[in-house]
Image (spheres, helix red, strand yellow):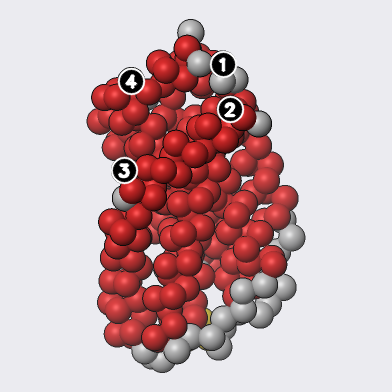
Amino acid sequence: MHGILAVYLREALILKRRLKRQLAGMAVSPLLYLIAFGYAMGDSVQFGGHTYLEFLIPGLVAMSSMTQSFGISTDINVARFYWYIFEEFQAAPVSNFAYVTGEVLAGMTRALLSIGVILVLGLPFGVVLHYGPLFWLAAILNSFVFASLAVALAMLVKSHADQSLLTSFVITPMAFLGGTFFPVERLPVWAQKILFLLPLTHASNAIRAVALGEMPDWRAYLVLPLTGVAFFILALGSVNHARD
């Protein structure tokens, strides 16, 4: 437990020091999407009787929780390749489990902050949504999935530039194709089958269903934790390999 707290508090102190810049960065893209896609379209585009803004905000919550939790990988790589902090953790009595858990919790914290930013940004647009326990459960599970993936991949890459490639080829396509900006059901059947393999698709659907006052698909609450645990185990193996 002390090892987990040590790793987490280090990341929390860094986040606290950069908090204003981090919050501003978390707000820019969602605000642009809300203005460019949501507000500009108004009520002209509707999905299932809901305005596009009502459809968009839950998608932005899913996307932002993914990108911000995965963003912990950048901090890990900076610490590894430039500050050599990882070598200090190697020398310290901190287990792989404690290190991975601390970093994952740090990624999830960033994700929850970004969700709060989006919900605040949505207030001036007059969108009324439901934020019940299942909404937050889906958001937390989504953050857990991508924070665990971030730690796993951050330990596998050989340079900071490689991490940027992973973001470009993995996270960015998922952000636009995972049901965030349009219903996956509008795509051809073969494309739907592929996209339903992505954890973000399940997170987007569950978060949106609860936000719109509908019953979410229970499969999302099974797929997300199983995927998160699989990525967490992969992260443990990656840290062990990096230490060797």
The image position of residue 97, as x and y in percent, is: 62, 26
Mark 4 closeness class: few <14, some 14–19, many ≥20 residues within 10 Å: few
Sequence order check, earlier mark of 4 and 1 = 4
Amino acid type, callout 4: Tyr
**Residue at the spot 53% in from the left edge and 32% down from the top edge:** 6
Label 2 element class: helix
Amino acid type, callout 2: Gly
Question: What residue is disc 3 on?
Answer: 168
**Residue at the spot 40% in from the left edge and 86% down from the top edge:** 125
The image position of residue 130, as x and y in percent, is: 62, 79
Distance between mark 3 and mark 4 Cα atoms: 25 Å
> Mark 4 touching mark 1, by CB under 8 A?
no
Residue 190 visible within the image: no
**Residue 84 — which label?**
4
Mark 1 closeness class: few <14, some 14–19, many ≥20 residues within 10 Å: few
Q: Is residue 216 above or below residue 79?
A: below
Label 1 element class: loop
The image position of residue 141, as x and y in percent, is: 62, 51
Question: What residue is disc 2 on?
Answer: 3
Which tag is nearer the camera, tag 2 or tag 4? 2
Mark 3 closeness class: few <14, some 14–19, many ≥20 residues within 10 Å: few
Name the side, left or right, on which 51 lies relative to 223. Answer: left
Label 4 element class: loop
Question: What residue is disc 1 on?
Answer: 93
